[in-house]
Each structure stands twice: as structure tokens, then as C-alpha cells.
Image (tube, helix red, strand yellow):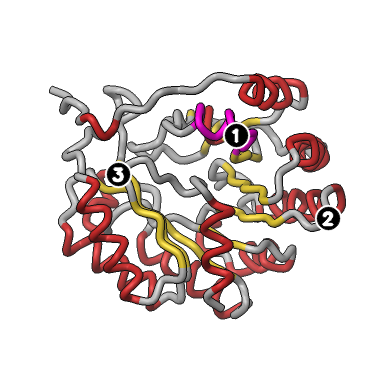
Amino acid sequence: MALPKPDWLRKRLPLNAATMKVEAGLMERKLHTICQEGCCPNQGECFAKGIATFLILGDICTRNCRFCAVHHGKPLAPDPDESGRLALEVRELGLRFAVVTSVTRDDLPDGGAGHFSSVIRAIRAECPGVGVEVLIPDFQGSASALQTVIDAAPEVLNHNVETVPRLYPHVRPQASYSRSLELLKMAREMDPSLLTKSGLMVGLGESATEVEDVMADLRKAGCDMLTIGQYLCPSDRHFPVAAYIHPEIFASYRQTALSMGFRSVAASPFVRSSYMAEKGFQAAAQCR
């Protein structure tokens, strides 16, 4: 039986002209967002502010993580024109900071790294001065793929560990906790000036000690920024919610993370990887 949601997890979904503008632009330019495909609870809030997190390389993932609402299966070939259309949408929305993620593309030799690079460069060309954060898959641990993305010079490189290592076989059976940590470590070594970021969900059955151990592992890997949010089950076919974590616990996690040396920490029930991303970037950049 599903756990009843507590009061702090109830949110109104605003609808205004900005929301309709975002939705219309995405449809016109045939673009995807993780907001829509991932059933993000903040979609209405962000769209109402004219903000969206773009999902590139299609909307079909080659992996099947049990927490994720994105469809899995055999994806189509990358669209070479997607980069230009996305850059035009960034300009049209007037974004100052663009966040770009992707489905995992284990079917591609570089995992889609070259496409990430093209998107970053297209945004730079179309929208000078706009900051870019990329939330990348693990590229199966490929150093050359990671270097391709870093060479395009995003302001923030994000890669989520998602949960504690004990739960990986149940929640992320095709992923590797150690590989994700190594990817973040490699990014720090390849470009020491690059801000790196990671995030995890809570409420999957982890303990507070396990969460703190993940924080410590991320800091050892040189991670600068952290997000922690409540896991919400997309459907009865996905991994069930084990607990709804009280906002006071999130506040405690945030203080612990800051004491460990993270430059920017967002921790609350509705926090997601890209939620208030520009604010997090500014906070981390000021700590340099």
C-alpha cells in the first residue's frame, strides 16, 4: 500500500501565460524536457517562471532505473539539428542560465558526449553570456567522452549518484556507484576550475548515516555542489517510497553538507537536480 503524502508534499500547479509560452515553444521546436518526461513536481512552478530543463538525445533511455519515469527501450539516432533548435529556445525564453540533461545512450560510441558538446557550443553562439549547466550520464566511465563535454566549457558539470550504494542493485541495477564517483573525480582532475555537482534522492530506504557517507564520498571526489530531494514514485510499477522525510531532516542534511565544505547545497522535499540551478551556481561561484 502506498504511503499517504504528508502536507508538506502538496503543491499547487500555477498556470499562466509564461507556462503556455514555454509549452508552445517546446512543441514548435520539437524539444523535450526532463520536467515533462520525468514527471517533475516543480514543472508548473518552473514553466510559470519561463524556465525549463532541456532533455536531449530523445526521450527514450537505454537503461531502466526503477525510480525514473522516462521511457526505456531502443532510441532513435541523435538529431543533428537539435542543438540549434534548443539554442533558439534558450534565446526565446530569455534564459540567463540553461540546464541541459539527456537520457542515457549506451548505444552510442561516445554515450552522447559529442551531442552535449554541440548543444553547449550552440548556446554559446546563439546566446552569448548565458551560463550552462549539464547533467550528464556516466558515459560508462569513458574519460574521452567526459573530456569532450568538459572541452566545451560548461559552467557546471552535474552527475547524480541518485542514492546510497546499498540500494543500487534495487534502484539502479545498470549503474555503478563507484563509477559515478570516479567520473566526478576525473572531471575535477581534467579541469580544476570547473564546478562539479551531484544529487541524491532520499526516502528510498536509506539511513541518515548512509546519506552522510555519500556526502563524504562526494567531497573526496572533489564535488562542489549538492542537491537532496524527496523521492516520489512515478507509478505503481516503480520503486516504492519507503518514507517521506521531514523538512527538518533536510535542513539537517544541508547543514552537515555545508560543514563538509560543499560550496552550494539545496536540500528540501521538492529539490531536484536542476531546481533553482542558477541560484546554486551563483552561490558556489561566490565561494571560489
Say whether marks 2 and 3 touch (CB < 8 Å): no
What type is the residue that disc 2 sits on? Pro
Residue 275 screen position, x and y as percent = 49, 45
In primary-sequence order, the first of circles 1 and 2 is: 1
What type is the residue that disc 3 sits on? Val
Quarter of the view holding residue 33: top right
Q: Which mark is residue 128?
A: 2
In primary-sequence order, the first of circles 2 and 3 is: 2
Q: Of helix, strand and loop, which mostly describes the magenta segment? A: helix
Residue at (55% x, 57% y) in the render: 139
* Disc 1 target residue: 49
Whole-angstrom CA distance, mark 2 to mark 3, is: 39 Å
- For the residue carrying disc 3, how many other residues have a C-alpha within 10 Å: few (<14), some (14-19), or many (20+)? many
Say whether marks 3 and 1 touch (CB < 8 Å): no
Residue 178 screen position, x and y as percent = 37, 66
Q: Residue furthest right?
A: 125
Q: Which mark is residue 13?
A: none
What type is the residue that disc 1 sits on? Lys
Q: Which mark is residue 171?
A: 3
Which range is magenta? 43-52
Work out whether residue 77 or residue 120 is closer to the camera in this orientation and state it. 120
Q: Is residue 234 left or right of residue 185?
A: left
Label 2: state its secondary structure: loop
Residue 239 screen position, x and y as percent = 26, 34
Label 3: state its secondary structure: helix
Q: Quadrant of the C terminus?
A: bottom right
Residue 284 screen position, x and y as percent = 53, 68
- Determine whether 234 is above or below 115 in the image: above
Label 1: state its secondary structure: loop
Q: Nearer the viewer, mark 2 or mark 3?
A: 2
In primary-sequence order, the first of circles 3 and 1 is: 1
